[in-house]
Image (cartoon, grey):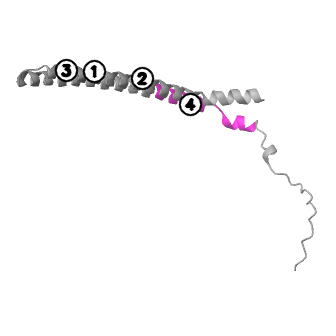
Amino acid sequence: MYDTMMKTFADQMAPFNKAAEINKKTAEKLFELQSAYMTEMFNAGMTQFKALTGATEPKSAVEMQIAFYKDMEAKLTAAAEQEIAALTTAREELSSVFEESMANLAEVDYLTEMSNFDFTAMMPTAEKKPRAARKAAAPKA
């Protein structure tokens, strides 16, 4: 009975476990993307700083800065697209888990399952227990 109950519980918790695994996988992907992006931004900033310190004319420095910002915009856009793709994939996977769970829920006849459960063990009994004898109270002073 215990094994059956544990198997039933594990089966019922399977959608939650799948959802938790999907969330974990998505968070790891997002952390990886953001970590790579931050590293890239730091390295690009340092490279740009070194290049700007070597510039001799203001016009070349402005052109380098414009090129740097355009490059950073492209990298930011690519990173955002990757993050949106990861979130979209997670949403689709979670939706399929939810739909599967709802389909399984409709298949189970809970009234039949509940009729097999013995509720009488939880009900209070009408038998009265004898009360324990009480000690006499101390005399009043």
Q: Name the front one of labels 1 and 4.
A: 1
Q: Name the front one of labels 2 and 4.
A: 2
Mark 4 or 3, nearer chain start:
4
Image location of residue 16, percent across then percent down: 56, 31
Mark 2 or 4, nearer chain start:
4
Chain part drawn in magenta: 93-115
Q: Name the front one of labels 1 and 3.
A: 3
66 displayed left or right of 28: left
Mark 1 or 4, nearer chain start:
4
Disc 1 target residue: 43
Q: Name the front one of labels 2 and 1.
A: 1
Image location of residue 4, percent across then percent down: 74, 27
Is residue 140 in the magenta section?
Answer: no
Disc 4 target residue: 16
Disc 2 target residue: 29
Structural distance between the alpha carbons of marks 1 and 3: 11 Å
Mark 2 or 3, nearer chain start:
2
